[in-house]
Image (cartoon, helix red, strand yellow):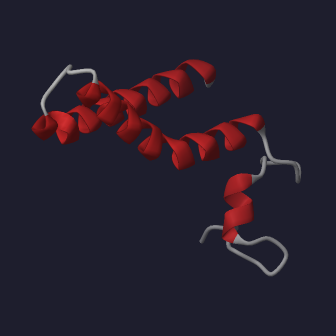
Amino acid sequence: MSKDLPTRERSARERGTFAKHADDPTVASYLSSLFFLLSVPVLLLVAFVGHSYGLYSYGAIVPAFAGLLFVAIALVFVIMHVRTR
């Protein structure tokens, strides 16, 4: 059985947010949270701006958003892979 169970001293959120051996959040955890919070609204805005500039029709906004989200997620995974080498 795993020893890493939630306790009264440290919740599951704190175990995921903070560094392994310290109580301070890491820069990576801040960037991950920032990406999680801002990716969807920013990518939706970019998709609508692309439509307003005439790059594609109104019906193509959702596929453009899906493509942008896929590219953003793939880019983040590539960055994570390179940084953890």
Q: Residue at x 48, y 29 (%)?
A: 76
The residue shown at (70%, 74%) is 6
**Where, quadrant-wise, is the N terminus in this rendering?**
bottom right
Res. 70 in view: no
Q: Image quadrant of residue 40?
A: top left
Residue 58 percent coordinates (x, y): 15, 37
Furthest-bottom residue in this view: 8
Q: Report if residue 52 is visible in the image.
A: yes
Q: Nearer the viewer, residue 27 or 38?
A: 38
Looking at the image, residue 51 lies above or below residue 37:
above
Q: Is residue 43 left or right of residue 79?
A: left
Residue 61 in which image quadrant: top left
Is 14 positioned to the left or the right of 36 in the image?
A: right
The answer to whether residue 41 is above or below residue 73 is: below
Task: Find residue 67 and report its horizontal and vertical position in percent.
Answer: 25, 31
x, y percentage for residue 22?
Answer: 88, 49
Q: Nearer the viewer, residue 79 or 40?
A: 40
